[in-house]
Image (cartoon, rainbow, N blue to C red):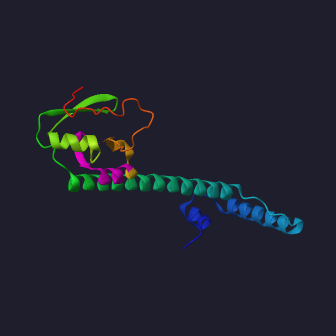
Amino acid sequence: MASLQEQFLKAGLVDKTKVKLVNQDKNKQKKAERRSGTVSVDESRLAALETQRKNAERARELNAQRDAAAAQKAIMAQIAQMVEQNRQSTGGGDIAYNFTHDSKIERLYVSAAVQGHLIAGRLVIICQGGSRDLVPRVIADKIAERDASMVVRVNKTSTEIDADDPYAAFQIPDDLMW
């Protein structure tokens, strides 16, 4: 393949005298470098290397963002699969179970058995997208490891009785509604 100078000569963009002058200047510069022992800095080459380095850095950043988005999508798919496989029914009851989600009080109608499981902490409410689902506590713990914002309500089961509690001897009736 012909050099760039030869291609310019054939195209008529430069003439032979300009090519000679450029070659003479290059030779003089090379001789001066050899005599003095210094290396001249090729600014265009440095600028090209800097541009190449910046492009590689930007490509790495974009790849990292793409990988993070793919990982988040995979986590959401795992959560959706866990909810789908372990979803519990609300029992079709007429008891309103109130809970807070995103600083709003929301209501879920459940049966008496499901209400007991929710109060005891065996079932947990998961809010995924616009749907609210009930899952066992073990599954809710796994979901919370991946994304804690989806777990709406977890009742802690406490069997410990405080010795200093003056009302410890009094039992709360089961049919008490607030």
Q: Quadrant of the N terminus?
A: bottom right
> What residue is drawn where x is 28% and y is 43%?
120
Residue found farthest to the top: 178
Q: Is residue 53 magenta?
A: no
Taking 123 as reference, is 26 above or below it? below
Q: Position of residue 137 (x, y in %)?
A: 30, 50
Q: Is residue 139 magenta?
A: yes
Is residue 128 visible in the rendered image? The answer is: no
Residue found farthest to the front: 169
Is residue 11 visible in the rendered image? The answer is: yes
Horizontal side of 34 relative to 146 (left or right) equals right
Q: Quadrant of the C terminus?
A: top left
Q: Position of residue 117 (x, y in %)?
A: 23, 45
State which quadrant residue 119 falls in.
top left
State which quadrant residue 164 falls in.
top left
Q: What range of the chain is rendered magenta?
A: 126-144
Q: Of residues 7 and 32, which is closer to you in this image?
A: 32
Q: Of residues 34 and 145, which is closer to you in this image?
A: 145
Q: Position of residue 106 (x, y in %)?
A: 25, 31
